[in-house]
Image: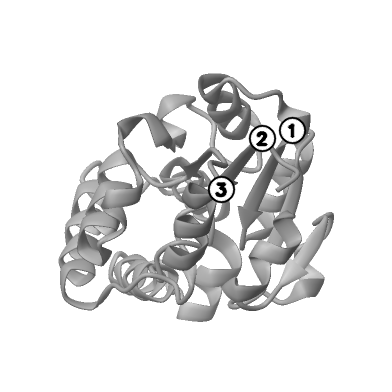
Amino acid sequence: MRYDLVIFDNDGVLVDSEPISNRHLAAYLTELGHPTTYEDSIRDFMGSAMHRIHELIEERTGQRLPTEFDDVFHARVFAAFEQELTAVCGAEQVLEKLAADSVPYCVASSGSHERIRVGHRATGLDRWFDDGRIFSSQDVGRGKPAPDLFLYAAERMGVAPERCVVVEDSPLGVQAAVAAGMDVYGFTAMTPATKLVGATGLFAEMGELADLLR
């Protein structure tokens, strides 16, 4: 492996949560009077921190989402995670390989710490991530596409940005990694390759990632 730290996005890269999350987000926004399809949600909000959802809705409509929006949304999504969520196919094998090769890794997600942990517990990935390997946009205030989260994760893990590689599946995440001065491999399982502009490389299946990281 030629990197000193592998930084994983969480939703869509480690856990297959994007379909569940965006289905519930679209339904809840529609319920609140902001008609949103699943496709709209994927296009506009995939990879976003919660504050970006609030900002975009207010920018477009002049209306603020209710104060309880985050709590209600997360309650619905977490309940669905417990019933439906699975790990991304091949993700655990990649983590096992990194651990066997003594390559440091962590997760840096736009999602909250609670969301990350709920997803990892539901899929069994929690055994690969202790508290010191989990970073959230909650830790830095500004989510992707700002580079803050990735830079924070690198600093906490004691690795220079240029020695890090990010594994991402959203345009916002790729932009954030590029802005942080890191290589980034774009996972195209849900996002067309043409939208992951700036990625160092692209892959469609987790089995391909180990070769890219060498």
Compute the Cα span from label 3 to label 2: 11 Å
Q: Earlier in the sequence, mark 1 or mark 3?
A: 3
Instruction: Give how far across and how far down residue 178 sits, in percent.
Output: 78, 42
The crowding category of the residue bearing disc 3, from other C-alpha atoms within 10 Å (few below 14, some 14 to 19, many at least 20), is few
Q: Are marks 3 and 2 in contact (CB under 8 Å)?
A: no
User: Is 91 left, or right, of 169 in this rendering?
Assistant: left
Q: Which residue is mark 1?
A: 163
Residue that label 2 marks: 4
Amino acid tagged 2 = Asp
Compared to residue 50, the image places residue 83 above or below, namely: below
In the image, 181: left or right of 145? right
Q: Position of residue 144 (x, y in %)?
A: 60, 42
Query: Could you tell me how far apart the alpha carbons at marks 1 and 3 are, in whole angstroms?
Result: 16 Å
**Identity of the residue drawn at 62% across and 54% down:** 167
Q: Nearer the viewer, mark 3 or mark 2?
A: 3
Residue displayed at 41% across by 67% down: 34
Q: Are marks 2 and 1 in contact (CB under 8 Å)?
A: yes
Q: Is residue 208 above or below residue 69?
A: below
Q: Secondary structure at mark 2?
A: loop
Question: What residue sits right under mark 3 in the picture?
Answer: 101
User: Dot 2, how many residues are within 10 Å of its Cα: few (below 14), some (14-19), or many (20+)?
Assistant: some
